[in-house]
Structures are given as structure tokens and as C-alpha cells.
Amino acid sequence: MPRPTVQPAADPQPRADEARGYELVVIGCSAGGMEVLSVLLGALPTDFAPAVMIVTHLPPDSPSYLVDALAHRCALPVIEPDAGERIMPGRVHIAPPGYHMLVEVDRTVALSTDAAVRFSRPSIDVLFDSAAAVYGERLLAILLSGANDDGVQGLKRVRALGGTTWVQAPDTAGSPEMPRAAIERGAADFIYSPETLGRRLAALPASF
């Protein structure tokens, strides 16, 4: 039987949980996600209030090009954080290759070389799960294009602890397996095209 097509959500007026102030936005992507990630970061205004933390799957033994590449597209500071660095509002934190990036209870960054999760280090699930435990309803998690299901369990954890989850519409993704898995397993609050993701993200409240 053919798989049903998942359509992006329309652009209605924001629900109360979309309009509330978030303190942290976590984003995960893999194959096919870089172009969409550039769209999202390029949409952020200079007064964007939440901190942003990003995990994307990269070969562990190659230097990361993400900070330089994304900094040219983003009005906010883009950094590759050190362990123990404070998670700062209005700053984009990129997981370094070969390390899990986690949120500590004191809202600092932890970096780990523990075993790969869902064949990945850094793992989207690891970031999402640790962020949900600290930020709860003040967390927005976004899952983009990817070829496996890393991030799906993390999204479910975010929802269970009161946070909000956005997922890229699979028919707009270069590799639809990751967002499709999130939708099929009930982990998506909203399903958006890349353009709507960027517009919604840029429209988040400037303070909390």
C-alpha cells in the first residue's frame, strides 16, 4: 500500500504554546538538512532571545566547517562551545564533530565521547533528552531532514516534559526518513515546510 503523503501545516495564527517564550531552541539534522538549517538561521533577527543548540551528523575525524559556514548566514554569534561554557541567550551553539553535546542542570554545555547513539556521535537524541530535562516547557525542539531515526525519541521526551516539537515536512526533505519517523511515532506537534519553519522561528517572542 502506498505511504500517505504528509502535507506541511498551513500558516494559521499561533497557538498559545507556540506564542509562549522559549529559553532554548534545539535543532537536529542529518543528510539533506544543511540547506534548511541555513534557511532557519538566516531568518533569525538580531534580537532573537532564546539560545540555540544544534546537532548535525558529521564525520568524527573531520574538522567542522559549520561555524564558519553558518556564521555568514546568521545575524547571531555562532560558536562551537567548550565543555562548561554557559548556554547564552541569542547565541548559536554547534556540537563539535565526534562529541555528544548535552545540557547540564546549571545550563552549561557538556561534551561527551560516550558511545554513539543511533549510530551517531553527536546524537540528536542525547541533546534533545538532556535539554528537555532542564528546560521543560521552555524548550522548542526542531527536527529536520535525515536518513535515520536519531532525534525521534528525543522529540518524544521533549513533548512528555511539556516542550514543543516542530518537524520538517517529509515531502520537502532531501532525506525524509527522519522527519517521517517522528510523525509516524507521534512525536511532532507541528509539521512545517522550511519556509514556514523559518518564519515561525523568527516570529518567536523577543523576551520571556
Image: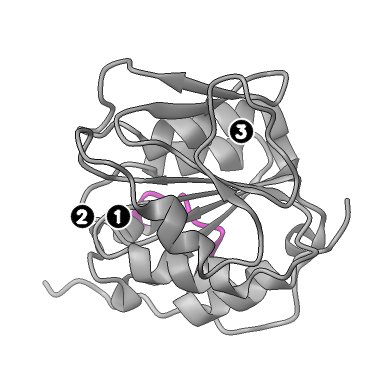
Closer to us: 195 or 88: 88
- Disc 3 residue type (three-letter): Ala
Q: At x 68% / y 18%, what residue is drawn?
A: 105
Write down the residue under mark 2. Answer: 147
Among the two numbered marks 2 and 3 on one chain, the one whose residue lies closer to the N terminus: 3
Write down the residue under mark 1. Answer: 178
Closer to us: 144 or 39: 39
Magenta run includes residue 35: no
Task: Indicate the quadrant where residue 6 lies.
Answer: bottom left
Magenta run includes residue 190: yes
Q: Secondary structure at mark 3?
A: helix
Closer to us: 75 or 39: 75
> Total marks drawn?
3
Among the two numbered marks 1 and 2 on one chain, the one whose residue lies closer to the N terminus: 2
Is the stretch drawn in magenta largely helix, strand or loop? Answer: loop
Which part of the image, by quadrant, shows the N terminus? bottom left
Q: CA distance from mark 2 to mark 3?
A: 23 Å
Task: Indicate the quadrant where residue 2 lies.
Answer: bottom left
Q: CA distance from mark 1 to mark 2?
A: 6 Å
Cβ atoms under marks 2 and 3 closer than 8 Å: no
- Disc 1 residue type (three-letter): Met
Q: At x 45% / y 69%, what residue is drawn?
A: 38
Cβ atoms under marks 1 and 2 closer than 8 Å: yes
Q: Which residues make up the magenta segment?
A: 184-191
Write down the residue under mark 3. Answer: 132
- Disc 2 residue type (three-letter): Ala
Looking at the picture, how far across and down is residue 193, in whole percent?
46, 78
Among the two numbered marks 3 and 1 on one chain, the one whose residue lies closer to the N terminus: 3
Density class for disc 1 (Cα within 10 Å; few <14, some 14-19, many ≥20) is many
Cβ atoms under marks 3 and 1 closer than 8 Å: no
Density class for disc 2 (Cα within 10 Å; few <14, some 14-19, many ≥20) is some
Q: At x 57% / y 39%, what residue is drawn?
A: 158
